[in-house]
Image (cartoon, helix red, strand yellow):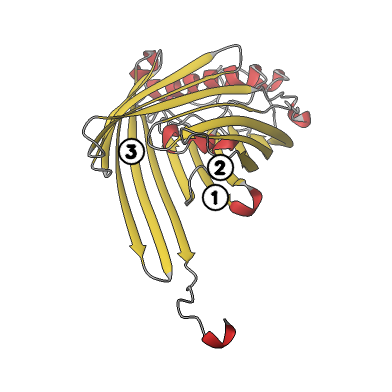
Amino acid sequence: MIRTALSSKTFRNSAIAVTLFGAIFQADAQQDPQFTQWFMEPAMFNPAVAGNSDLTCISGVYRNQWTGLSNDPNTAMLTAHTMVDQLKGGLLLSFYNDVLGQETNNLARLGYAYHLDPMANGAILSFGAAVSMFNKTIGNQWVAIDDYTADSAIPNDQQSASTTDVDLGIYIRKPGSFYAGISATHVAEVALGQLSIQPTRHYYFMGGYDHQLDGDYLVLRSNILAKTDLNATIADVNVNVLWNNMLWGGLTWRPGDAVAPVVGFEYAMEDKQKTSYAKQVFRLGYSYDATTTELSNYSNGSHEIFLSYCFKFQQIPMQNRHANPRFL
């Protein structure tokens, strides 16, 4: 018996949302957030990326997935990292909020990446680790065709639980040429006791290469990300062209899921003075995921916006160019 009168479209949307939630809930696994523009800030999934340049970077991304569905997933993530010379490495701080129907996930992460001295070819290898605090909340606003209270797997009241975990990563990068990394999230797989849910370790393999088509004026950039929990694997393949270090456009292909056009804009400012140096970089990106599965019959695709601000402000000490002969 249907407890609430639903229109045909609303019923289909609700059924899909419940089915998606059920698949995640029964899997006893925490699904990491998915972002199409991950290559704009790889530190999202690999703590070894922290401090990979001499700029301090603050990045934010918002994703509205499968628009048109009731209770469609919404994810927001904020990432900040910087190089600390005294520590010979970078510090990482990130947060995300991920809402999918009756499920809400929140995570805070603090990490450190140790950087080795540059190799002969200019490449830099780094090793990273992060500690995270993770919270999951399961709501109780159900729409069901039967009495769901008879199913012990579905909570009658809102429930919440928290746990700590560890992420690890390795990253190598040669500026203007290539990068590659391997990382793992939820390494400790510490259970969310009250919810009886076991987060599952996820593995990430990422890489990218920049090919100069016309010097620095036109650059072909390729990026690939493969992620797996050893039960299922998802891959993102992206190719984009950067024009004049300012505008870029390209396409991401996620086999068996979506095709996503990606566009973006970058603006850099640099100011050199006798006693100071300043550099600021603003980046804005947008992607649209066109779903290639049967879900496209009910969803209008996914929208994602990326913003970042990177900066460096440095004071240059004055040098005494005139020696006093009294102190020679």
Q: Check the image and report above or below for 19 versus 212.
A: above
Badge 1 amino acid:
Thr
Cα distance in 3D space between marks 3 and 1? 24 Å
State which mark lies toward you, 3 or 1.
1
Question: Under tag 3, what secondary structure?
Answer: strand
Image quadrant assignment for residue 38: top left
Image quadrant assignment for residue 194: top right
Q: Which residue is mark 2?
A: 50
Q: Is residue 101 visible?
A: no
Q: Which residue is mark 1?
A: 82
Comparing 274 with 294, the one in front is: 274
Cα distance in 3D space between marks 1 and 2? 6 Å
Q: Given the current orientation, which residue lies at the most extreme right position?
A: 193
Q: Pointer 1: residues within 10 angstroms few (<14), some, or many (20+)?
A: many
Q: Pointer 3: residues within 10 angstroms few (<14), some, or many (20+)?
A: many
Mark 3 or mark 2: name the one nearer the start of the chain: 2
State how many labels appear. Answer: 3
Q: Are the residues flagged by discs 3 and 1 in contact, CB closer than 8 Å? A: no
Q: Which residue is mark 3?
A: 286
